[in-house]
Amino acid sequence: MNISGWKYLWSAQDIRRKLLITLMILGIYRLAAHVPVPGVNREAIQQILAGGGAAGTLVNLLDLLSGGTVSNFSVLAMGVYPYITSSIILQLLVPIIPALQRRMQEDPREGRKWMEKYTLLLAVPMAALQAIGQINLFTSFAGGVPILEDFGLRGDTMLPSITIILSMTAGTLFAIWLGELISEYGIKKQGLSLIIFAGIVAGVPMNLGSILADQQYRYISLFFMLLFTTLTIFAIVFVQQGQRNVPVMYPGRRMGNRMSMPVKGTLPLRVNMAGMIPIIFAQSLLTFPAILASFFSGSQTPWVANLAFSITNTFGGGGSAYWIMFFLMVVAFTFFYTDVLFSQQNYGENLKRVGAQIPGVSRGAPTQKYLTRVLRRITFPGAVFLGVVAILPWLIGLVIPFGGTTGLLLVTSVGLLIVVGVVRDTFFNLQAELKLHGYDEALLVR
């Protein structure tokens, strides 16, 4: 008797063990997400969240993406984002520094090991700096009320402050370690993605509860929430699946004294090759000026304090200027990151090595230039789409006068992009696991 792929997931002992390990590790991560940083002033953070404006918008967005760890100011408040930022920085440095480019091209396997090692090493100082910046930024948002009573890198507060920074950095490294455990013993290559996914999905009940708590616009908000969420998911899936199939002729094989005919094939180029990396990088860069300005918000010099307040307000996520800059940076980084990623893959030389050729295009460098030109054309709609997804909460706030900038989405648009991507990749990974176990019609219920 045939059984469905979903039932086979649990009847196959190896796959069942991987799924249970993954769920157990995600459960541990969610438990650790409720461990607060020592000495945190939760009332000050709740005041920021309820205050609205630039501060409330940014903190609420960070809280939704982290699954509530920011509102608790947990030791996992930064999640795995310092590691992701470190990875992006190193990937962008590869084409700029010739020695790194040669290392990656000469031995890709050793190059990947080197990349993983130094990404982790770079994530440590990145996490420490982000912890300091996040604490100072939240303190400035709270009107100078310290969110941590004993924080200050001078005098008697030096030792407690170092302890706090170390605990937040350790929380980030703990989250990275859990992600690596999932990739090794659970669902392959999905560790960090599932860690981020768990944080985003954990914020769904809280966001749904805030919509239902609105007595005046409860049902209208619920209708628009379902409408916008459904349309956004549909658009994300449609664009993520979009690709251009470039025709490629592969040489025939010699069988004895006879030569077979050339084989026609295709090289798929995706519309959105960069995924959501440009959004993360653009958001990190836009948040950096606000974090830097937070160090000077308590300055005794009036013009310095006013400038710091202006920068924090502009880059805090509350004004139109922030969202316009966010859109432009996402579009620009999508093109830049796609070019960097595609040049590293070097399809021109790889096709030449196997004797393949695109009809009407010379092998080698001309092929790479042709493919780059095609990729840039199809990347344009993908880049604009990512930019629109990034600023969708602001656009909804312009059209709908109630519900705030994020209240009419069950998950933020950026969160939906991550969730849909992770679900899609996990689906394909499980499908591959089922095929390895001899189940060809995976995930089809009969």
Image (tube, helix red, strand yellow):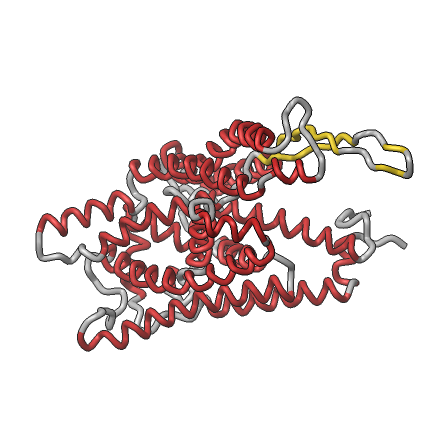
Q: Residue at 30% across / 43% down in the picture?
A: 318
Name the residue at the left extreme. Answer: 301
Q: Quadrant of residue 194?
A: bottom right
Question: Residue 247: image x %, image y %?
Answer: 69, 28
Relative depth, front residue between 151 and 209:
151
Q: Is residue 308 left or right of residue 302?
A: right
Question: Residue 78: image x %, image y %?
Answer: 40, 60
User: The N terminus lies in which quarter of the figure?
Assistant: bottom right
Q: How many marks?
A: 0
Q: Is residue 108 left or right of residue 385?
A: right
Name the residue at the top extreme. Answer: 360
Question: Residue 206: image x %, image y %?
Answer: 45, 55
Relative depth, front residue between 46 and 444:
444
Name the residue at the front extreme. Answer: 257
Relative depth, front residue between 398 and 63:
63
Is residue 203 visible in the rendered image? The answer is yes
